[in-house]
Image (spheres, helix red, strand yellow):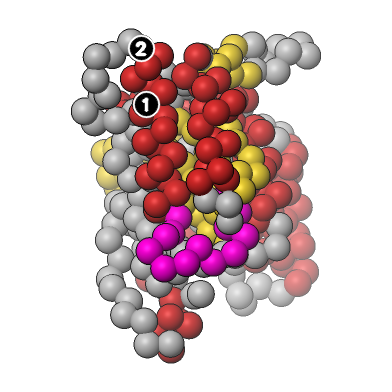
Amino acid sequence: MTREEAIAAGVEVYETQHSMKRRTPWHDYSRKGTYMLTLVVKERMALLGALKGCLEGEVAPYVEYSALGRAIIKEEQKKINRHYPQVEVWKLCIMPDHLHMIVRVNEDMGEGKNLGNVVAGFKSGCNVAYWKLFNMNEPPRQGLFETGYCDKILMHEGQLDNWKSYLDDNPRRLMMKRQNPELFTVLTGMEVAGEQCQVVGNRFLLNIPDKMAVIAHRRYTDEENARLREEWLACGERGGVLVSAAISPKEKAVLREAMNRGYGIILLRENGFPKIYKPSGEAFDACARGLLLQISPWEFHYEKRVITRAQCLHLNAMAERIAGGG
């Protein structure tokens, strides 16, 4: 059920509480659905395993599970279906300090039961396993995992395959972050084009003198757009950097082509960066290779805002100043 459907049905919808672990207030978690859950170990302690392998040669990185990690895989995840027959674990990804699960609620769970009860029961079982494996006299007061959890709701075609790929790729992504920590660290208060900004990525792209601002104005003819596209991609081909807010479809298409070709990109964003942030998909690989710098002159927010005309003009002006060496 979407927010609009919930309002139409008379469900009371509250204002969003800004948290990475918030529930979707208009969604009924007792009904059937598919979810990706993320649970984080207290203080990000690597209690579930250790990252092994490397990115060189044919050896892919992987997680070597601890005794606790193995207990979760072999025992605790199976208890979910045992206690809640309506619920299946479709995929489990154990990382050193957190885990992801894709779960399917195959039918409505009935009054008084919901996904939160399932997660609470799973956490309780993991707490007991933690307690026993570490020979504690009593269960840990605060539990193995942080309070709460993050859930994503399956909403559209292709989303499930993206989730599965994300889980499979997690060890490689973690290895790349560890090998290039400076490229994935959010820097605040950095002056760019005369403004205090948040940045993530290879900030030395700013020092490359050959830069072009990718801005496709609506007044441009098809011929002008085609000529500019060739000029922009030629800049990337000779080792230059493309600077853009990637607002219009034509700008997005040029940045996509540039990323596919492995060119340097400075991307301006309407939104800043949360405390724990990493780019997704192809942008993650571009960042790890030092080919991407993301910049925002504004603080991070959780809302899904539509960029305003004033913000578009602001970011385009920044792109031109950056490309001009400002």
Residue 84 screen position, x and y as percent: 52, 50
Dot placed on the residue nearer the N-terminal end, 1 or 2: 1
Q: Image height check: is 126 above or below 314? A: above
Q: Is residue 246 magenta?
A: no
What is the spatial separation of the Cα atoms under label 1 and label 2, in whole angstroms?
A: 10 Å
User: Crowding at label 1, few (<14), some or many (≥20) Cα neighbours within 10 Å?
Assistant: some
Residue 147 screen position, x and y as percent: 29, 41
Please identify the quadrant where the C terminus is shown. Answer: top left
Q: Assign the magenta stretch its main secondary structure.
A: loop
Total marks shown come to 2
User: Crowding at label 2, few (<14), some or many (≥20) Cα neighbours within 10 Å?
Assistant: few
Q: Image height check: is 323 above or below 262? A: below
Tell me if I can see residue 134 in this picture: yes
Residue 35 screen position, x and y as percent: 55, 54
Query: Which corner quadrant of the image does residue 11 belong to?
Result: bottom left
* Residue depicted at x 73% and y 13%: 59
* Residue depicted at x 28% and y 14%: 136
Secondary structure beneath label 2 = loop
Question: Which three-letter amino acid code belongs to the residue tagged 2?
Answer: Phe
- State left or right for residue 131 relative to residue 92: left
Residue range (magenta): 102-115
Residue nearer the viewer, 249 or 284: 284
Residue receiving disc 2: 134
* Residue depicted at x 43% and y 87%: 9
Residue receiving disc 1: 128
